Amino acid sequence: MKKLLIALLSISAIGVAIAQSEVEGVSHQSHEIDDGMLEQTDLEQAENAGVAQAQMNNPGGIGGVHSLRGASELEATRAADAFKKYPREQVVSSDYVYQPPLIPHNIRGYEVSLNANKCLACHSWKNAKEMGATKVSVTHYVNREDAVLADVSPRRYFCLQCHVPQANAKPLVENKFKPVDSLQ
């Protein structure tokens, strides 16, 4: 990118020199470009040296980015991973105290937005018994001032900020976490 910018600036400088020479009455065909215009400034030389050093330290051109999912070029779009499999109606236990319960089913296509919350169609106190779903905790009906509300508190409305579906997916990093004895 820097090389392209430097090349464009150089071409612009040459174009200005040609235009200036034509204005001064010098013929377009017989103009000569001053050697000083083609020499790089100290700043340009430093930038080019930095680009050359980066290219030497980064064979393959991936930008030095290595994520948990592997290396990929910055300019390339990596293919999306396959969708994870969500076991139907699995029982997911808690691993630590006050852990937000994991979602034991697929939520693909669920809308949870300012205008709608698909989770509450089953988990609201009004619908939970009929749907056979777990009720939303009473803590979700309390606001910041500890006032009990008639509906889910706005700060607890967006379920997916805390609750996530549990997929059968290979962990990205090794996890040696062990739950407390009282939860085993």
Image: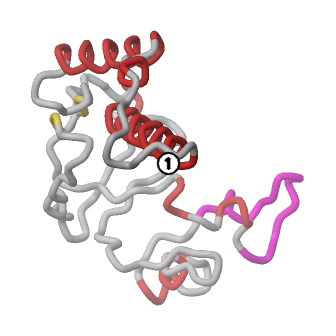
Q: Residue at x 33, y 41 (%)?
A: 30
Q: Position of residue 22 (x, y in %)?
A: 49, 48
Q: How many marks?
A: 1
Quadrant of the image containing the N terminus: top left
Up-down: is 63 above or below 91? above
Amino acid of disc 1? Glu
Does residue 46 lie above or below 6 as drawn?
above
- Magenta segment, which residues? 137-151
Give percent across and percent down for residue 58. Answer: 18, 21
Q: Residue at x 68, y 57 (%)?
A: 139
The answer to whether 108 appears left or right of 46 in the picture is left
The answer to whether residue 140 is magenta is: yes
Which residue matches tag 1? 22
Q: Residue at x 15, y 35 (%)?
A: 70
The C terminus sits in image quarter: top left
Instruction: Please state if 176 lies on the left or on the right of 139 as rendered.
Output: left
